[in-house]
Amino acid sequence: MDATVKTSFTGHEEETQTRAGVFWRPTAKTGLMSWLTTVDHKRIGFLYGVFALFFFLVGGVEALLIRLQLAVPNNDVLTAQQYNEMFTMHGTTMIFLAIMPLSAAFFNYIMPLQIGARDVAFPRLNAFSLWTFVAGAIIINLGWFIKDGAPDGGWFGYAPLTSKTFSPDHSIDMWVMGLQLLGVASIAASLNFIVTIINMRAPGMTMMRLPVFTWMTLITAFLLILSFPAITIALVELMMDRLFGTSFFEISNGGMPILWQHLFWVFGHPEVYILILPAMGIVSEILPTFSRKPLFGYPIVVFSGATIGFLGFAVWSHHMFTTGMGTVATAAFALATMAIAVPTGVKIFNWIGTLWGGHLQMRTPMMFALGFIWMFMMGGFSGIMHSAAPADAQQQDSYFVIAHFHYVLIGGSLFGLLAGIHYWFPLMFGRKVSEFWGKLSFWVIFIGFNTTFFPMHFLGLNGMPRRTFTYDGNLGWNSPNLIATIGAFILGIGVAIYFGVMIYTYFKGEKIRRDPWDARTLEWSIPNPPPEYNFAVTPTVHARDAFWYEKHHQAEIAQEKAAHAKDDEAHGGIHMPFQSVYPLVASVGLFIMGLGVAVLGGGAAVKLPVSIAGIFIMLVGVYMWAHEGNEGFHIHPDKEDLNS
């Protein structure tokens, strides 16, 4: 049965009208079922964050095992096969299962609040993207629990290492199918974010009044939609090679292994900016707040982000300078790689301009943001070195490259995301994080990170190749490796302090008033934690720093809120979508289909029926989902909430 519910905010008044058309609808607001069936963008963002942080810890354990193996020469903590599995899963986990979904957590939670929306454009599609991400993550990690073992072909999956000849078991099949499901989740979420930002902005929220974080969300969503088809094609071709005997990458039958590299890096280099642009957006929100002044050069920051996204598609072959592309192609990609440093440098100068002359408040989010700038610059400087093909030829596949991309992706992306967690934690949970423990975690992470990865520059220049599981004691690599391993454990302690403090604060932290930072954007104008409907009255935006304007024009804003409240009441209150179980059902169907293709033995006699069953369940879920329609329930906020 379908139901349209009209209810007050306090839940005392209900009118229910039913009609045929829906097979089953959950109504619980608490308990496990409420989380499994939620379509609330805030809850979905929270779940994305929980899963991302879990996999971040998994990836961290994998990294510590790698460093233990390399701490001293001729070590035997891991075998060569276990080491291959460990570095493959570490890279895959950190990129696809930690950093990307942690960014998606902020996209889901913060972006609708920043534009004055009550939810995303397609709430059930949002839930589907979450559970499809979970399905893909499980399939990728199943190898740890079955005899075939985890994927071992590198997170980049270079052909022909991923062919049946070199990887005959199911581990690469799991990697391929898991990434395919993650791609489905990412594209579904990206389409949702684009439609939300374009169509659901509050009145007066023009594109050039959007917060920078929302702009980076929009650009990242376009990058995902435009880049994921390339790796999707590559993964489909690889699966066909493995399951059906085609020869896209099998050189003995006329295939081209280098085709994989082109397809992978057409996705892989925009992926770098998919990982870094959200952190840049977060930093662009934090610096003005704690500098007590507007962002310097807002239009330039926005357009430089768009330029980074555009140029990101023109530099993929700088990952392939040693493959023999020829001098013309090498020169073209070298110049394009040098050019992309310009809009990145523009952002850094604008951030410095924001800090210059400001009344700086060195709170914990500010410290993580400043750490992001410094370490991202370190990674950027070594990246410029790699844009010169002769230098790249010397540093290719050495530990110098390991140092470079960890300074970009941990020193950059992760520090920005950790800054965002600290910054928006009071908004999400209404509790204050201890400044002492927050700053302590920053310094331990900062020291541990630099102790780990700075010596790797020297290891690379001294000739240590990446992806080697042991080394002799007479090569001059002993001390830097030991220092890096000690640093990795210091970094692990810092991360443990950080998340221990967050967990303690979630349960026991001091409750805090609204807008503790005296911030500038709309998400801080509502109670914390935010109510289900976000805004009791749809805001009207008058300036780029919308909430800053509200604070200084309270009488005008109060009149607008009263008029909008009457309009909402005339339309029956605030319309909110029902919970739905069908996105979860569709994702479970995809999960079963993925298991059938990637994991199960027994050949087609077993794989085909299981895969067909999974597709059938998915189609049933989508069919029921489509027949739910767009009915929902109406909320009438209390007067106290309307006046807040």
Image (cartoon, helix red, strand yellow):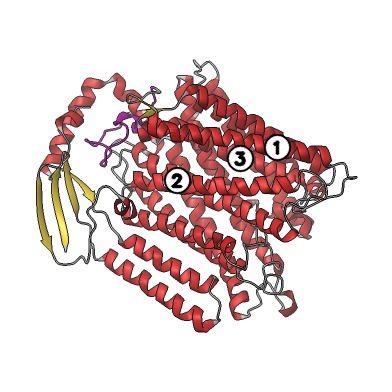
- Secondary structure under tag 1 reads helix
**Amino acid type indicated by mark 1:** Thr
Q: Residue at x 39, y 30 (%)?
A: 508
**Residue 534 is a magenta residue:** yes
* Residue 9 point in image, percent of width and height: 17, 39
Q: Is residue 133 visible?
A: yes
Judge whether residue 349 can be spotted in this image. no
**Residue linked to disc 3:** 410
| Distance between the alpha carbons at the discs numbered 2 and 1 | 26 Å
Which residue is disc 2 drawn over? 50
Left or right for 491, reference 595: right
* Element assignment for label 3: helix
Q: Residues within 10 Å of mark 2 (few under 14, many from 20)?
A: some
Disc 2 residue type (three-letter): Val
| Residues rendered magenta in the picture | 518-541
Q: Is residue 454 magenta?
A: no
Residue of label 1: 452
Tag in front: 1 or 3? 1
